[in-house]
Amino acid sequence: MLDPSDWSAFRAQSHRVLDDALDYLERVRDEPAWREVPDDVKTRLRAPMPQEPAGFEGAYREFSEAIFPYNGANVHPRFFGWVQGTGSASGAIAELLAATMNANVGGRNHGAVYVERQVIDWFKTLFGFPPTAGGITVTGTSAANFIAVLVARTWALGTRVRESGLAGDALRLTAYASADAHSCVRAAFENAGLGSAMLRVLPVDERHRLPTAAVAAAIARDRAAGYRPFMLIGSAGTVDTGAIDPLDDLAELARRESLWFHVDGAFGAMAYLAPSLQPLLLGIERADSIAFDFHKWLHVPYDAGCVLVRDGEMQRATFSSATAYLTRTQRGLSSGSPWFAEFGPDLSRGFRALKVWFAIKEHGARKLGEAIARNCAQAQYLKTLVERDPAFELVAPVGLNIVCFRYAAPGLHGEALDRFNEELTIRLQESGIAVASSTTVGGCRAIRVCIVNHRSCDEDFDVLLDALRRLATE
Amino acid sequence: MLDPSDWSAFRAQSHRVLDDALDYLERVRDEPAWREVPDDVKTRLRAPMPQEPAGFEGAYREFSEAIFPYNGANVHPRFFGWVQGTGSASGAIAELLAATMNANVGGRNHGAVYVERQVIDWFKTLFGFPPTAGGITVTGTSAANFIAVLVARTWALGTRVRESGLAGDALRLTAYASADAHSCVRAAFENAGLGSAMLRVLPVDERHRLPTAAVAAAIARDRAAGYRPFMLIGSAGTVDTGAIDPLDDLAELARRESLWFHVDGAFGAMAYLAPSLQPLLLGIERADSIAFDFHKWLHVPYDAGCVLVRDGEMQRATFSSATAYLTRTQRGLSSGSPWFAEFGPDLSRGFRALKVWFAIKEHGARKLGEAIARNCAQAQYLKTLVERDPAFELVAPVGLNIVCFRYAAPGLHGEALDRFNEELTIRLQESGIAVASSTTVGGCRAIRVCIVNHRSCDEDFDVLLDALRRLATE
């Protein structure tokens, strides 16, 4: 009843839509990197829920006029604003197929389940996890880190925590991460009821990394004060500077202190696909759990992340439940145990594994790794350009793919210089030439260029600096 | 670098893929409702991560052979297995567009943000929530219920719970739901650290509804024992029988007892779009929060759910965080406050609002409501067919759109009859004619027919019962 009344008309219309989508991606370099949503469009998008149908044609017309032209920019070759992937044309086609199948990958016995298992197995193998490890795709690393915290909570307290909640002893559980760890790690502790105060946030060293000795000292202090250290979180690619914590040292410390070692590898973990970058991540293969995104450095369309847990049974024990309508059978559509819904909080689960599967099948791991290595080389290229021009100064080491620098406007210092650089970043966005972002690093306001973009070429960084120079002197 | 090297070849290939997808949906009635994944396909889907590219063409070939034919069935007109939506052809096109844009709707100032705001506003208005209410799209009702529990936790304990965790008083917080409430409600209490024991699960009445008087008595008992009742959860459409709790009475009780009133309306809340069904949901407009899915009775492709919170500032206070790289500006791409990431746990958020927007724009609210009402009428039709044939017997009242019945095989009782009906359900699936599921209702094993399907017509239920009769006597 919601199907097209005229399939051939719908088919013709769909082919036109597909051409529009491909036209956009093919020519995105000629589009402005960002344009503001005009006020009349904002007004249009405040219309009340329609009672009567506009038809697909009518809906698409409004989409073409009021939504598509004001896209958020991460598909542009000069989008360097935040750690966001670029998407891809074939990723969009994979999403079309996933939505056509409409698969719910919560569980049961159907093709999509085997695809997600394959994707999870690929990454278990990549990171040296055993076949008994668990894993699921999720919306992103926020969800993945939360799942890891819950599994570590089960490991520390036993499954009785599910029923009894966080009573008594539980309130002495402490965990450790760097001050540059992502805010979603803190949120995971809040949402799990453990409290963010129990996540000890330690200052980073001059390379923006978590110093292992500082963690060891904090653990000793906490033990002496009667706390119960249970989890250590290393970051593989921090959001501000791209720094990678000394994962191997942290893994060793966690082993010695009997802590759960979790790696938040939101974007950085994927650098493991590039042989030249693997050494930077040494130690990740010793983690008890790893969280990372596919929608960042693998460029699959939003949203798609993943969590892997070395002890798959511990993950299952954290989430599995048995209820009447979810009964398993040995045959039929209700077979296929274990179900993915037993390994995370969602019972209905979209088929986000398909777009990951397509990216890896289409390109192969080697080429995806090369695209990542190329972004890191581009960061070094930009660093050289910045260092060569006295108008600019670097404000943080270039860890992986993020370059933080500022325009050293003559005669400006302190807050005035901060404001100048923030305004410069906004004007860059408004110019439509490129998108960078602002952040505060080492106490000063910086222009932050995150390079997670398979469409960028070296010339795009020349264009970026030229634009900044021109805008700064205007 | 991950773009097609030959756009025109990729374009031609994409158009062929689109035709395949539309062919499938146009002819899905002629497909078996389910077919088992063969062993050789399972083996094929265990191949290791490829290093070298197969190209889009190669990837699509494998998809066509090993994945697409083994789809999970919910797109079929005789899929009645679980409460799953049917998807739609235009929903698949909407997903293609969302993935083309690759929008991250965590926040900032771009078109997708205004679309999600519009979708949320539509449903706030539908349920009589004020403009100051908060809301976000999520993966589904599991996530939506969890967010509601966290916001209610903030309401009960103040925002200090984020930092301090669940110390002292927090451990006396109790909540109330029926024994037929969804298992994800219990999981929300587990994951939030409150403990499932504090969710008081009360027996249902003969219509499978939560009796208000029993809740009142449980609250009184808990208060007397020093507990602190804080939350009452009503179900709008339980998963086993489709029962709707007496929401208006529960809302009144919650008001009187100063509890947070949450409605889990996973699929049932959407019945509010049908004027004839609205009276069944009376009281939902008094809720403090509502959780529901778009991927069920609105048939948007998986996954898409929603949570609405009457007190938007309470929702924001539960999740909002301020960190350097998320700094807001007054202009540019970093403006557009408030950001959706402040209203839930995910910082990266896919553009799932677009497929909802398309469904409502294309069809209009009235037609979507009619499709829901038609499913409820079909449940009554099936009920009549079951009652008319002495070979079958109903085992639960038909609440909304779910019919639980069994084949009363002559001479079989108790466990033997249970096993017979479970086997019959599996054989039905294996026949490819239709998909129903098994559940235990009122102590006996039933065939459960959930009608959330815009492709079903009345004859499909005749075909279903004919098949069951034939399989039962074979």
Image (cartoon, coloured by chain):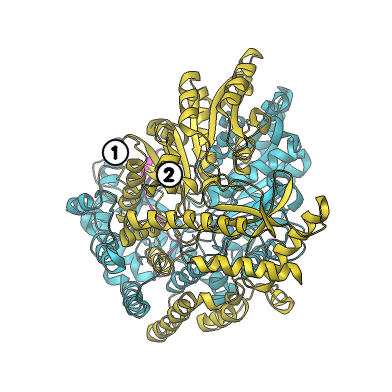
Chain colours: A yellow, B cyan
In x, y percent, where is residue B272?
A: 61, 63
* Residue B443 is one of the magenta-drawn residues: yes
Identity, as a three-letter code, of the amino acid under mark 1: His
Residue at image mark 2: A341
Q: Nearer the viewer, residue B470 or A281?
A: A281
In x, y percent, where is residue A12?
A: 40, 85
From the viewer's perspective, is B376 left or right of A430? left
- Label 1: element kind: loop
Image quadrant in which you'd find residue A205: top right
Q: Residue at x 63, y 33 (%)?
A: A193
Q: Which residues are magenta?
A: B439-455
Image quadrant in which you'd find residue B259: top right
From the viewer's perspective, is A115 left or right of B188? left
From the viewer's perspective, is B99 left or right of B37? right
Residue at image mark 1: B413
- Which quadrant of the rendered structure holds the N terminus of chain A? bottom left
Q: Residue at x 55, y 63 (%)?
A: B351
- Which quadrant of the rendered structure holds the C terminus of chain A? bottom right
Task: Give the crowd class for mark 1: few <14, some 14-19, many >=20 residues within 10 Å.
Answer: few
Q: Would you say residue A160 is visible in this rendering?
A: yes
Q: Residue at x 48, y 42 (%)?
A: A291
